[in-house]
Amino acid sequence: QGHVAESGGGLVQPGGSLRLSCIASGTIFTIYEMGWYRQPLGKQRELVARVTRGGSTIYGASVRGRFAISPDYAKRMVYLEINSLKPEDTAVYYCNVRDRLGESEYSQWGQGTQVTVSP
């Protein structure tokens, strides 16, 4: 079974920036999609951004233009550049890696990294 780990979260002031990193290790087959999701305290998990191996990228409406996702399939990593942070961006950010072997598909999640935006 594969393992996904996020890093790079922290406390940042409004208007600041962070770079989140995610690495997949262990038994990972062919990755076809990687993404970032977030879950504010007491709310549901929501899409931040995801990218397919074919290059298709989708961003959540609230982060479009401020966040940028970039995959590195060779390293099994995906990054999230987050800029112009707002207090409402405060959440636990989760990495999701989807891989497949033949017709079998897998979805693996990390434990999350906390991003707190506060003066």
Image: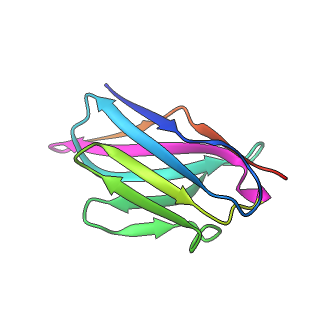
Q: Which residue is drawn at 77% across and 59% down?
A: 14
Q: Residue at x 34, y 69 (%)?
A: 56
Spot occupied by residue 117 in the image (x, y as percentages of width and height): 76, 51
Q: Does the magenta stretch include residue 102?
A: yes
Spot occupied by residue 118 in the image (x, y as percentages of width and height): 81, 51
Colour mapping? rainbow
Q: Is residue 29 magenta?
A: no
Residue in the foreground of this view, choosing between 99 and 64: 64
Classify 53 as above or below 41: below
| Residue 111, image quadrant | top right
Q: Residue furthest right?
A: 119
In this picture, residue 89 sits left or right of residue 5: right
Spot occupied by residue 33 in the image (x, y as percentages of width and height): 33, 53
| Residue 4, image quadrant | top left
Tally the marks: 0
Residue in the foreground of this view, choosing between 63 and 33: 63
Query: Which region shows up in magenta?
Result: 87-104
- Quadrant, the N terminus: top left
Q: Decide if residue 99 is in sight here.
A: yes
